Image (cartoon, rainbow, N blue to C red):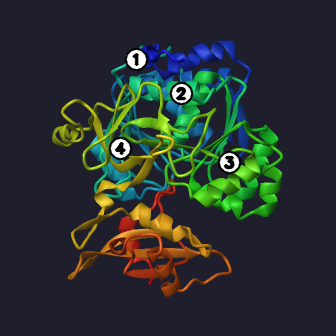
Amino acid sequence: MMDVSRLTETDGGLARMHGATAATRKDHPAVRLPDENGRFTTLSHGELDHRSARVAGWFHAQGISKGERVLLCAPNSTVFVLAYLALHRIGAVIVLANPAYTDAELRHLYIDSGARAAILPDDRELDTPLWVSAEQALPAGDPVPAVWAGPDDPAVLAYTSGTTGIPKGVVLTQANLYSSIRAVLAAWRWSARDVLVHALPLSHQHGLGGLHATLLAGSTAVLLPHFDPAEFTAHVVESRATVLFGVPAIYRRLLAEPDQLTTLARVRPRLVVSGSAPLDAADCVALGEVFGQIPLERYGTTESGLNVANPYAGERCPGTVGLPLPGVRLRLLEDSEIAVAGPQVFPRYWNRPETSEEAFTEDGFFRTGDLGEFDRHSGHLRISGRKKELIISGGLNVYPREVELAIEAHPDVAEAGVAGVASARWGEEVTAWVVPRPGTRPDEAGLLAHVAARLAKYKCPKHIHLVPDLPRNSMGKLMRRALGAKNQ
C-alpha cells in the first residue's frame, strides 16, 4: 500500500529528482525521439542531466530566473525534453503550447502568461526579446546546479484547450505534478525496466505524464512526434515496449490495420493505457484480443492531473474509467458533476481569482465540469458527458454520450457525435452525426429505429447525418461545438 502522506514530497523539484535518478542510471537509455535534424536518437539519463544543465546555464546567463515564465512550443523532440528539463533546473515556469496552435493562439498564451522568452518553430513569430529556435540545437552555457523548488512553487502553466471559450492558464505546482505521477508509478507498478512508447504531444498532460514517469523511475520512453500505424508498430517491436499510451483515435486506426495488429500481437506489452476520450466498448474487446488484456482506461483533467483509473491487477470494466488513484478523493455533486480533491489538484487559474473561486466547492473540491455515475456492479466511475454539453430538449436533460453509445451499438456505425441544435419547438433538438463503418451506408430511418429500441423517446435524435469523420482536437477529444459545421 502506498504511503499517500509522501505524495507531496517533491525532493526539490523535477530536475533534482532526475539528477538523483541519473546518478544511478547514468548509462541507461532515457528517451528515444527525433533530434533537431529529425533523426531518431537515444539519450541516456546521464546525458539528459548533463546536457540540460548546460542549456539551463545559457538561459540563466540571459537573465531567466526562478518563477519567470517561458513559452515552450515544440514537437516531441530532444529540443523539447532538454528545454523542459533545463527550465525546471533554473526554476522557471514552463508555459506549454501545442505546435498545432495558430499564431493568434500562441500570442494569447504568451501575453496572458507574461512570458519572458519563447522557444518556437522557425516559422512562428512573437514580439519577444528572447527567441529560441525549436528546430536547431539549443544554445548551451556553463552547467548550473538545479535550484531548490518547494512543493508549492509553480512548475508548469498549462492552458485549457479552449473548446468552450478562451483558454485559461492552469497553475500546476511541483506537488501537483509529482503527486499525480507518483500515484501512477505505484498503481501501475512502473519500474526502471519499463519501456514506454507513445505518439502523444508532450505539450499535453497525457503525453507529458509518460515523460515524468520515465524521469522519476529511470526507465525508457520512445516518444514519436506523430502517429503512423506502421512506424508506431515498428518502434513497439524494436524497443520491446512494455507500456503503451494512446487515445481511442490511435487505437481505432491500429484496429483498421490487420498487418500491424498481427505484429503487435507478438509483443504483448504488460500495460496498454487509453485516455483523453471514451473508448468504444467494441474496440476495447477487439484490442483485448490483440494484446491479451483490455486497455486500462483512465481519467484526468488539465486542472487535476490523473485522478481515476481501472486497476492494473483486477477487473477492468469497459466503458468505465475505474477507481480513484492514491491520494485522490472523488464524489458526485447533486447534478452528477464529478468533483475531486487531493494533492494532484491545481490551486488556481492564472490571474483569474473569480474563476478560480467558482471552480471549487466550499469544502475545496474541484468542479471538473464532467458528469459521471458509478457502475452499479463494479463501483467504477463512468463518464456520461460534459456539464456544458448537456442537451435540454423539451425541458428534459439528455446526456450526449449516452445517445452516442446507443448509436455506436449499431453494427454499421464506426463512431457517433451528438449535440443539441437550437429549435423553436424543443429549445434544443438532439442531433447526431455518424461515421459509417467502411463499406456500409446505414440509413437514417434504420438508425433512428435502432436508437428508439434502446432509449426513451425524448433522448432519441431528431436528425442523423452521415459524415466521413468527426471534429476532434489534437488529443482525440470530440469537439461538439464544431459538429454543427459538419457537412450535412
> In which quadrant of the rendered image does the N terminus lie?
top right
First in sequence: mark 3 or mark 2?
Answer: 3
Q: Which mark is residue 128?
A: 4
- In this picture, is 394 found above or below 401? below
**Is residue 344 toward the left or the right of residue 251 in the image?**
left
At mark 3, the secondary structure is loop
Few, some or many C-alpha atoms within 10 Å of disc 2 (few <14, some 14-19, many ≥20)?
many
* Distance from Cα at disc 1 to Cα at disc 2: 18 Å
Q: Nearer the viewer, mark 1 or mark 4?
A: 1
**Total residue callouts:** 4
First in sequence: mark 1 or mark 2?
Answer: 2
Q: Position of residue 255 (x, y in %)?
A: 70, 60
Mark 3: which amino acid? Answer: Gly
Task: Please report contact status of discs 3 and 2: CB closer than 8 Å, yes or no.
Answer: no
Q: Position of residue 337 (x, y in %)?
A: 31, 47
First in sequence: mark 1 or mark 3?
Answer: 3
283 or 169, which is in the foreground? 283
Q: What residue did someone put label 1 on?
A: 149
Q: What residue did someone put label 2 on?
A: 55
* Distance from Cα at disc 4 to Cα at disc 2: 19 Å
Mark 4: which amino acid? Answer: Thr
Q: Which mark is residue 38?
A: 3
First in sequence: mark 4 or mark 3?
Answer: 3
